[in-house]
Amino acid sequence: MVIGGGQAGLAAAYYLRRAGVDHVVLDAQPSPGGAWPHGWNSLRLFSIARHSSLPGWPMPSFSDGYPTAQHVVDYLAAYEKRYDVPVHRSVHVTSVSRADYGLLVRADAGTWTARHVISATGTWWRPFRPLMDLPGHQLHTVDYRDPLEFAGQKVVVVGGGNSGAQIAADLAPHASLTWMTRREPRYLPDEIDGKALFDIASRRAGGVGELGDIVAVPPVREARDSGLLVATPMDTGLLANADVVIWCTGFRPVLGHLAPLRLRDEHGRVAVDGTTAVGEPRLHVLGYGGWTGAASATLIGVGPTAKAAVAKIASSLS
């Protein structure tokens, strides 16, 4: 059983199919694409199409530089069809618990028993929002779509990572923008893209964090170089005077369905050996970030960890 039909779930399904392991994918979304249909309108990948592919089939080329989110959605939908992924929509999994035969997966559409479960639910559906009582409208990265919605307003974007930089760059020509970060923004070298990030994350113990936090994709680079993207320190007064505050403060893994297994630590994560849960070897967590494999939350990076997880499953079943 694979829970989640986004990029991590599809990568797992590819290797399960290749290994001859019977499987079903349960996806809560009504259509393919995982979280990609829900990003802001100007969202683009960090790397060109050929360096943004799932296992088995390269992403079709994109003529205008870095692919758009819609290009990714189209690719993921075609990938599903190409490999005849047995996905069930819209199925919301409510719990995973232990049973005599394996793991019991309960959902709003029924109950399944599986000998192994791969949890690939991602993080997009659990945004982290600081709790502050402010007079203005408060949004999160997940709520942002188009800068014209905020034309002429005083907007504070909080967050020094990629989402904060991209959304601030998007808003800068249209709104009275304040970009607020806890420390001076750290840009990666301009020539670094998604492929380079994957290579670095795969071979360095310290990962990409040693180099910086923000990939200087063209819109961010242009806004930075033109002086439109200037960060200021955290200031509660500026927050209180804003018409809108957009919190680009990250996400947490969506693991509530695993609560009956009692595996999560104080940080909300599951202790793993590779992708296998230490406290429950029939559970595998895939695509949540560095703790489930180098660059595993990316299109190009999820393949190796999906392959390793399925190899472990296939070995167990045989």
Image: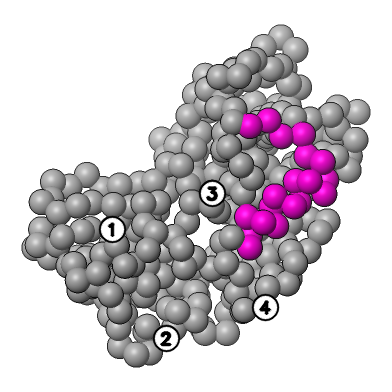
Residue wearing tag 1: 246
Mark positioned earlier in the residue sequence (2 or 1) = 2
Give amino acid for label 2: Glu
The quarter in which the N terminus is drawn is top right
Q: Secondary structure at mark 3?
A: loop
Task: Provide residue 45's location: percent of width, then percent of height.
Answer: 57, 67
Residue wearing tag 4: 63
Give amino acid for label 4: Ser
Residue wearing tag 3: 35
Using the image, determine if residue 85 lies above or below residue 185: above
Residue 222: mark in rendering: 2
State the extent of the magenta-drawn residues as a range.
Answer: 71-89
Mark positioned earlier in the residue sequence (4 or 2) = 4
Q: Give the spatial CA distance, label 3 vs label 2.
A: 27 Å
Q: Nearest to the eye among marks 3 and 4: give it.
A: 4
Q: Give the spatial CA distance, label 1 vs label 3.
A: 19 Å
